[in-house]
Image (spheres, grey):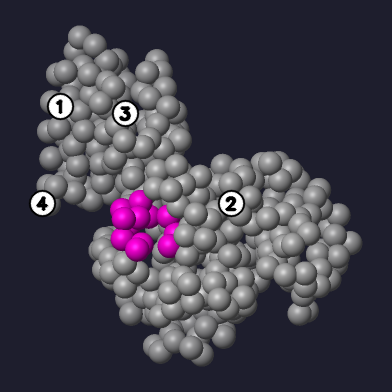
């Protein structure tokens, strides 16, 4: 069975002589449970249990399984892995109390927590467990992983995205789209956002998601968005909903690059999907039709490059865009105090935007894809650090 790149890191951490809570977080359906269970096959002193399988999982249930694990940790270190921890009511306060008790009694019990919603996990961690945990983020699959595991081509990655559970359906595109919409998108929206967060206008959140994925790779002001959505509320509501979609690893709004932080936050967002499957699930075209239209395929490629870069932002890379008037630079990557400009082109169009960006900010390096530049098919194989 294919093992993701995080396998060895997790195995190493489980063997370390430390007792900080380890949190494995990331979007739904990226293989967190599969990954952790692969690791546990190599370890004898461990137990995996999921709160998702328990109706009404609460503090009492959590304390019961914790106490059972404590008994196993009397003579040797023991690892307890709790999946879908965000489903447990008041989980963070209970974990804090039990964890602190174990530290006081020097109980050799290691705790791993798994959850699908980054935003909800971070809220619970920051509120109750400060200083007690480390987060290991599991991003969407990358092209090199899909190529090795399923034989994906760059074009298939750009169109079908990176959900491993849908990979065997891509030859039946209509069936693939139904699966992505019904089993992946609905599950993520309902279980990671609507069921766990108070949403006053759930239909507005869904409409924002569908509009945002439709315009992935494009800049839209919240004011313009309001004109396209019914029952739209206000820009603050839209910004909050976009933040929730971002936390669930579905859709984000890239900020305009600026030295001034305030200017960044006041800019119109550039929508960017975390996974191309979310974009094409609502697209009436198929891949061959899209490839035959250069302008349409160019937008697909730009969004695919954006999703590739997003899968590394948890490693300290900041991803933005830049625009001045009617010219722009598609992506601006900042890392360790250095800046790289990246323009995605399918032809030899004007590079006026990159010229203005270079003069304004003196970036560390700039790149343009296209006939005489960096091939986008090569770009999606690269770690962003390589660009620096």
Q: CA distance from mark 3 to mark 4?
A: 27 Å
Q: CA distance from mark 1 to mark 2?
A: 46 Å
Residue contact at pointers 1 and 3, CB within 8 angstroms: no
For the residue labelled by badge 2, is the local secondary structure a helix, a strand or a loop?
loop
> CA separation, marks 1 and 4?
20 Å
| For discs 1 and 2, the disc positioned in front in the rendered view | 2
Rounded to the nearest angstrom, the CA distance separating label 2 from label 4 is 42 Å
Say whether disc 1 or disc 4 marks the residue closer to the N-terminus: 4
Query: Of the residues under marks 2 and 3, which one precedes in the sequence?
Result: 3
Q: Nearer the viewer, mark 1 or mark 3?
A: 3
Q: Which mark is residue 39?
A: 3
Mark 3 vs mark 4: which is more N-terminal? 3
Task: Tell me the number on the disc at residue 132.
Answer: none
User: Is disc 1 in contact with disc 4, using a CB cutoff of under 8 Å?
Assistant: no
Tag 3 secondary structure: helix
Mark 4 burial class by Cα count in 10 Å: few <14, some 14-19, many 20+: few
Magenta range is 160-171
The furthest residue to the top? 75
What residue did someone put label 4 on?
A: 55
- For disc 1, the marked residue is 67
* Picture residue at 42% right of the left edge, 27% below the top: 8
Residue 149 picture quarter: top left
x and y percent of residue 168 in the render? 31, 55
Which mark's residue is nearer the viewer, 1 or 4? 4
């Amino acid at each position: 069975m294919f093992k993701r790149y995080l396998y060895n890191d997790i195995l190493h951490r489980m063997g370390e002589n430390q007792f900080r809570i380890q949190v494995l977080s990331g979007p739904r359906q990226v293989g967190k449970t599969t990954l952790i269970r692969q690791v546990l096959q190599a370890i004898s002193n461990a137990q995996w249990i999921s709160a998702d399988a328990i109706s009404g999982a609460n503090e009492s249930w959590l304390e019961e399984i914790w106490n059972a694990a404590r008994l196993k940790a009397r003579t040797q270190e023991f690892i307890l892995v709790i999946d879908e921890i965000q489903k447990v009511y008041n989980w963070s306060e209970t974990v804090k109390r039990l964890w602190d008790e174990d530290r006081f009694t020097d109980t050799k019990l290691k705790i791993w927590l798994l959850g699908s919603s980054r935003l909800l996990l971070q809220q619970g961690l920051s509120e109750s467990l400060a200083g007690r945990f480390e987060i290991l983020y599991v991003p969407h699959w990358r092209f090199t992983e899909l190529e090795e595991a399923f034989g994906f081509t760059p074009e298939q990655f750009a169109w079908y995205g990176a959900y491993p559970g849908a990979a065997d359906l891509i030859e039946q595109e209509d069936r693939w789209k139904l699966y992505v919409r019904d089993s992946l998108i609905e599950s993520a929206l309902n279980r990671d956002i609507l069921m766990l967060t108070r949403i006053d206008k759930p239909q507005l959140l869904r409409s924002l998601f569908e509009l945002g994925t439709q315009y992935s790779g494009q800049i839209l002001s919240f004011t313009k968005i309001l004109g396209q959505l019914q029952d739209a509320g206000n820009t603050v509501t839209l910004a909050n909903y976009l933040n929730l979609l971002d936390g669930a690893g579905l859709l984000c709004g890239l900020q305009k690059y600026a030295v001034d932080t305030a200017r960044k936050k006041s800019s119109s967002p550039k929508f960017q999907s975390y996974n191309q499957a979310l974009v094409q699930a609502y697209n009436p075209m198929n891949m061959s039709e899209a490839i035959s239209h250069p302008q349409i395929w160019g937008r697909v490629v730009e969004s695919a490059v954006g999703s590739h870069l997003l899968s590394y932002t948890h490693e300290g890379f900041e991803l933005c865009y830049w625009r001045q008037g009617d010219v722009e630079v598609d992506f601006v990557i900042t890392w360790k105090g250095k800046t790289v400009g990246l323009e995605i082109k399918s032809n030899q169009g004007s590079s006026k935007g990159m010229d203005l960006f270079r003069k304004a900010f003196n970036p560390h390096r700039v790149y343009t894809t296209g006939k005489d530049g960096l091939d986008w098919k090569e770009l999606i194989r690269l770690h962003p650090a390589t660009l620096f």
